[in-house]
Image (cartoon, grey):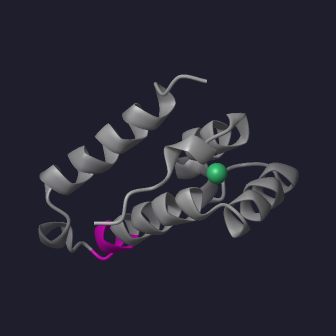
Amino acid sequence: MATADLSQCSDECREALSRLGAFLDGELGEVTQARLAEHLSDCAPCTERADFEEHLRELVRRGCTDAAPASLKERIRLQLDELSSAPG
Ligand SMILES: [Zn+2]
């Protein structure tokens, strides 16, 4: 499994990841959606996480929850926790 380079993480990354759920749901304002999309387009670690989360949501939307076991969701949550608690 590819590991994101957390050393690149900035406040922007933390904001992007903290709003990832709302972003994928299209719940943010137009400006914020555009800003996050732009950040994701040139931030590989965030793109990787967004893709992972989006894929998971897609599976859940289709009702294929068997394909996304709780352990996977837990792993994502732990990764996000790890990021949000990273120093700096
Ligand atoms: Zn980022």
What residue is drawn where x is 51% and y is 61%? 50
The image quadrant that residue 15 belongs to is top right
Image quarter of the N terminus:
bottom left
Q: Which residues are magenta?
A: 58-62
Where in the figure is residue 62, as x and y percent of width and height?
31, 77
What residue is drawn where x is 49% and y is 30%? 84
Q: Is residue 47 magenta?
A: no
What residue is drawn where x is 51% and y is 44%? 6
Camera-side residue of 43 and 35: 43
What residue is drawn where x is 46% and y is 67%? 54
Magenta: predominant secondary structure element? helix
Q: Is residue 87 above or below residue 21?
A: above
Where in the figure is residue 22, as x and y percent of width and height?
59, 49
Image quarter of the C terminus:
top right
Camera-side residue of 23 and 39: 39
Where in the figure is residue 56, as x and y percent of width and height?
34, 66
Camera-side residue of 46 and 67: 46
Where in the figure is residue 24, as x and y percent of width and height?
57, 60
Question: Is residue 74 shown left or right of residue 69?
Answer: right
